[in-house]
Amino acid sequence: MIEGIGVDLVSIEKLKKILCRRGGRFFKRVFSQEEFIIIGEIKNKNEERAIRKTAGFFAAKEAFLKAVGGGLFTMPFNKISVLNDKNGKPYIKIDENLRDLIYKKFKKKLDAVNLSITHEDGFACAFVIIEML
């Protein structure tokens, strides 16, 4: 059953400025180790693409939090990983402690997290639908 929907829009340029100012501190607070590696590999090939990917990851995390009824940084961002399957489809992987926190909040078990991310005209947008049992 659908329990939550979240959407978020991130200005890629605005995120780029934040990264220039806060860099490492921002990454440690917001991104998981898996995401850090992925973004680093992309950055080695194409810095602009890495910034777009970073903005998409950030938008997905915010959309996820909105879908579960939380605000910005009500749950640790770095415990939410945005990854891609072998076909390139994005998905959200959640730390077990965070999964337990969500269970306590809703009294229901998280069944599925559906994610879509797009980039266009200097923005990254993510849409999340949460299903619970």
Image: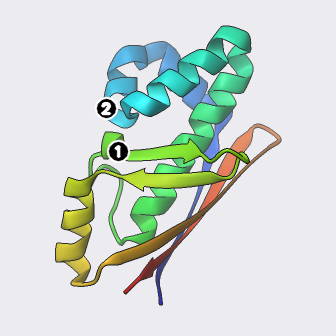
Is 45 positioned to the left or the right of 130 in the image? right
How many numbered discs? 2
Q: Nearer the viewer, residue 14 or 125?
A: 125
Looking at the rendered structure, the kind of residue marked 1 is Phe
Question: How many C-alpha atoms fall within 10 Å of the one at disc 2: few (<14), some, or many (≥20)?
Answer: few
Residue at left 64%, top 26%? 51
Which label is found at residue 77? 1
In percent of width and height, residue 91 lies at 56, 54
Question: Whole-percent x and y of residue 22?
Answer: 40, 18
Q: Residue at x 19, y 55 (%)?
A: 97
Mark 2 near mark 1, Cβ–Cβ under 8 Å? Answer: yes
Q: Residue furthest top?
A: 44
Whole-percent x and y of residue 92?
Answer: 49, 54
Q: Residue furthest bottom?
A: 1
Query: Circle 2 sits on which residue?
Result: 29
Q: Secondary structure at mark 2?
A: helix
Residue 106, percent from left and from top? 25, 81
Pick whichever, 65 or 11, lies toward us: 65
Q: Residue furthest right?
A: 121
Q: CA distance from mark 2 to mark 1?
A: 7 Å
The tag on residue 109 is none
Q: Say which label, 2 or 1, has the lower sequence index.
A: 2
81 is higher (above) or lower (below) than 44: below
Image color mode: rainbow
8 up-or-down from 36: above or below: below
Question: In the picture shown, does residue 4 fall above or below 74?
Answer: below
> Which residue appears at 34% of the width and 60% of the height?
71
> Within the image, what quadrant is residue 42 found in?
top right
Q: Is disc 1 surrounded by few (<14), some (14 to 19) or many (20+) residues within 10 Å?
A: many
**Amino acid type at image mark 2:** Arg
Which SS class for mark 1?
Answer: helix
